[in-house]
Amino acid sequence: MQHIDEARLENDLGYRFQYLAEFMGFSEGDITAIHDAAGYLAPIVPNLVDAVYDKLAQYDATWRHFVPRQHGYEGDVAEGVESLQMSDEVIQFRKQHLGRYLTTLVSEPYDAKMVGYLDLVGAMHTPGKGSSSIDVPLVQMNALMGFVADALIATILGLGLAAEVQERTLRAFSKLLWLQNDLINRHYAQQPATQAAAVS
């Protein structure tokens, strides 16, 4: 039986990722499968991004988070959720970020830098990182990740890959998204439960 330092899981990002990857069986083979999918997925990243933002725009609970000024964005902002449009510069700014994220997943090595990047994706949606006015409730992050997972699965199933390649690719992305989801959730466990107050 392997000993796991549970306290270290909470304060050592590399150790946490290594444990989760080993437990889930996220291997070099999975990383290869993800990278091999780049040629298929990279060209349709804009379509995936559009699908995500079309979904986000359907609910005030998700769309409202693009009204406050975004970290790194210095252009105009909408006065409120009702006036925020898909064509607004801030939405194009955020779409570029999501596009880079998806492209990074299928093109970059899964080293310490990548683990830090995946962790930052979680942290930036809480007040502790990025803009202090951005506090996306965990329920909305889970909804988003579920939608992204389903969109990726549907995309991969529609590529016409050989059955063995399709299975390998689906399983690799499934593990990756669970790893990403943990690196989102951990930042909510580290902060006070302020999301409910932010909504009311």
Image (cartoon, rainbow, N blue to C red):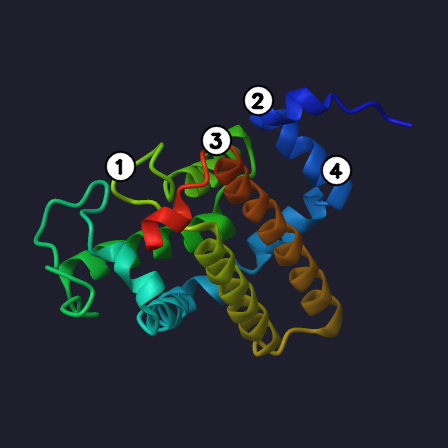
Count neighbours of disc 3 (C-alpha within 10 A) and say few if under 14, some if 14 to 19, many if 20 or more: few
Task: Name the residue rendered at 18%, 47% in the picture.
Answer: 69
Between the C-alphas of marks 4 and 2, the distance is 18 Å
* Callout 4 touching callout 2 (CB < 8 Å): no
Q: Is residue 149 above or below residue 159?
A: above
Percent of width and height locating residue 59:
34, 70
Contact, mark 3 vs mark 4 (Cβ under 8 Å): no
Of the two numbered discs 3 and 2 in the rendering, the one whose residue sits closer to the viewer: 2
- Vertical arrangement, residue 103 with respect to residue 194, above or below: below
In this rendering, the answer to whether 188 lies above or below 146 is: above
Q: Nearer the viewer, residue 21 or 138?
A: 138
Quadrant of image for the N terminus: top right
- Type of the residue with mark 3: Lys
Residue 120 or 171: which is nearer the viewer? Answer: 120
Side of 27 relative to 193 (left or right): right
**Viewer-side label of 3, 1:** 1
Q: Secondary structure at mark 2?
A: helix
- Per the rendering, the mark at residue 180 is none
In the image, taking residue 178 as reference, residue 122 lies left or right, namely left
**Which is nearer the N-term, disc 3 or disc 2?**
2
Q: Which residue is mark 1?
A: 132
Q: Residues within 10 Å of mark 1 (few under 14, many from 20)?
A: some
Measured Cα–Cα span from mark 4 to mark 1: 34 Å
Numbered disc 3: secondary structure: helix
Alpha carbon separation for disc pair 3 and 4: 18 Å
> Disc 3 versus disc 2: distance between alpha carbons?
17 Å
Q: Residue at x 39, y 67 (%)?
A: 52
Q: Do the residues bearing badges 3 and 1 touch, measured as CB atoms within 8 Å?
A: no
Q: Which mark is residue 11?
A: 2
Q: Decide which of tag 3 and tag 1 comes sooner along the chain.
A: 3
Question: Which percent across, then down, holds residue 73?
Answer: 17, 45
Q: Residue pushed farthest right?
A: 1
